[in-house]
Amino acid sequence: MAYDEKLAAKIRSVLEETAGWTERKMFGGLAFLRHGGMCCGIVGQQLMVRVGPEAYEETLDMPHVHPMDFTGRPMRGFIYVDPAGTKTVAAIRNWIARSAAAPKPSRAKPARKVR
């Protein structure tokens, strides 16, 4: 699946303003990571944004937003923004700020029990 190169260029222009960002091809699209944690990305023509579980329901009420259902099941804490919601650099800056402010899950995973 290809991703929207124009949207990627807009995101890069916003991310140039701060340090700690990298990008990586993932899930058939492009992901942008801050200090190693995924914050946003592009899947096809849509912007994917981590908003966190706390802001998830509230964010779904916003225009041009719907649940991220990449696997067929909505992923709580992640949303898709349709192209109409990412037309301007200001709109993209707003989504990136939301994503950067979202709490990131702990990297530490509990030990698995072995039977």
Image (cartoon, rainbow, N blue to C red):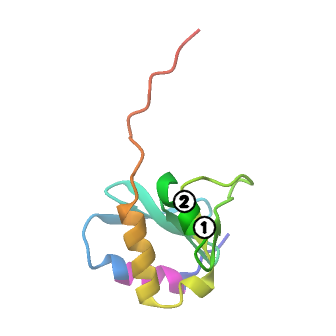
Q: Which residue is mark 2?
A: 56
Amino acid at the residue labelled 2? Tyr
Q: Is residue 30 visible?
A: no
Amino acid at the residue labelled 1? Leu
Question: Which residue extends farthest right?
Answer: 72
* In the rendered image, the vertical position of residue 56 relative to residue 107, given as above or below: below
Please report the residue visible at 39 percent of the width from the left and 53 percent of the height from the top: 103
The reply to whether the C-beta atoms of the residues labelled 1 and 2 are less than 8 Å apart is: yes
What is the tally of numbered marks visible in this picture?
2
Give the secondary structure at mark 2.
helix
What span is in magenta?
Answer: 6-13
Q: Which residue is mark 1?
A: 60
Q: Position of residue 1 (x, y in %)?
A: 68, 69
Of residue 101 and residue 35, the one placed in the foreground of this image is 101
Q: Position of residue 26 (x, y in %)?
A: 55, 59
Question: Which residue extends farthest top?
Answer: 115
Give the secondary structure at mark 1.
helix
* In the rendered image, the vertical position of residue 86 relative to residue 22, given as above or below: below
Please report the residue visible at 51 percent of the width from the left and 20 percent of the height from the top: 112
